Image (cartoon, rainbow, N blue to C red):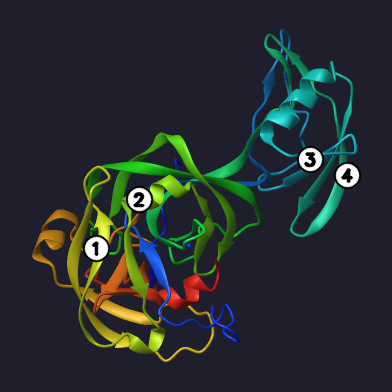
Amino acid sequence: MKRIFIIFIALLALFITKNTFACEYIYVSGSSIGLKLNTNVEVLGTFGVNTESEVLKPWDNLIYEHDILKEINDEQISSANFLESKIQSSKGQDVNILLSRKNEEHRVRLKPVKTDDGYSLGLYIKDCDLGIGTLTFCNEDGHFASLGHKMVDKEINGGELYYSNVSGIVKPRGSTPGEKRASFDKKVIGSVSSNTNIGVYGSINKEEMAKMEKMQLGKREEAHKGRAYILTCVNSNTVESFEVEIKECLNQKDTEEKGIRLQITDDNLKRIAGGIVQGMSGSPIIQDGKLIGALSHVSIKNPLEGYGCYAEFMYNCL
């Protein structure tokens, strides 16, 4: 089975704890979102720096692709912009870099090369990951849940939440999954706090909750085989409902993935998207008027089949 990866531009009463709830209500979405996750500064690649007389490689045998840059001259590297400012202010003097490679730390000394634009170490770097997904729900306090699976397999340092607009869909072909083509809105509507195995979570501006439907949160034991529907966007940021059939509900005790197995039965969604595609991760699964889960994975063998995680598990991560 294949996780629905999102494209790179590249979610009481006395003695009731957080892990149990009775008739809890949440705000269900289905909107297409853009997520920006701040990560450690990572080396994507290297290049030779041209001078008037030669090409220099200050990184040669010192820094490699996928190295994590942690400190420069004993100061924490908080972003790519911070590193760039320190390189420029060095005026060509050697800089000491603390980096991490395969869980081991190394210290290296590099000499920035003078260029027409300033100084350079000849490194391609990034400090964030971008992706498209679906907003699942939020609670009364404005804490949101999305995706239903981890976005990146690395530590994050917060992030930003945006709406995104779907401009088209590439249908699946053979073992290659389909995908939504979408772009970020300019306005930040929330912040990201965590990236877990069952979703990305954070806080959303409370005025956005007015666009969502208040609904009861279903317990995992309430999910059952039979008819249900998902909420997702296949055009712009218009949320639509599409019928699915739940084929299996696992009796999971812990916070796990893929507790719900389902199949797309909606002819309209089959025609538009050809099944489940990248970017649908987090689409709410509604059954009997309650939110029971979020779409999270697609079958590589059949794009009409996929999996979801229980909404109760996602709620416990808020």
Q: Nearer the viewer, residue 14 or 91?
A: 14
Closest to the camera, between mark 3 and mark 4, is 4
Task: Tell me the crowding category of disc 4: few under 14, some 14 to 19, or many 20 or more residues within 10 angstroms, Cα based.
Answer: some
According to the picture, the residue beneath numbered tag 2 turns out to be 210
Q: Quadrant of residue 164?
A: top left
Mark 1 burial class by Cα count in 10 Å: few <14, some 14-19, many 20+: few
Q: Is residue 83 above or below residue 6?
A: above
Sequence-earlier tag: 4 or 2: 4
Q: Percent x, y for residue 190?
A: 51, 46
Q: Which of marks 1 and 4 is nearer the N terminus?
A: 4
Q: Which mark is residue 174?
A: 1
Residue 313 lies left or right of residue 238; in this view the side is right
Residue visible at 25% across and 75% down in the picture:
289
At 82% from the left and 19% from the top, the residue drawn is: 89
Residue in the foreground of this view, choosing between 220 and 198: 220
Pointer 1 or 3: first along the chain: 3
Residue marked by disc 4: 107
- Which secondary structure, mark 1? loop
Query: Which kind of residue does numbered mark 4 sit on?
Result: Arg
Residue type marked 3: Asn
Q: Earlier in the sequence, mark 3 or mark 4?
A: 3
Q: Which of marks 2 and 1 is nearer the N terminus?
A: 1
Q: In this view, does 244 lie to the left or right of 192?
A: left
Q: Is residue 111 above or below residue 166?
A: above
Find numbered disc 3 in the image and state the secondary structure of the residue it sits on: loop
Is 44 placed above or below 174 here? above
Circle 3 sits on which residue? 61
Residue occupying the far front of the picture: 14
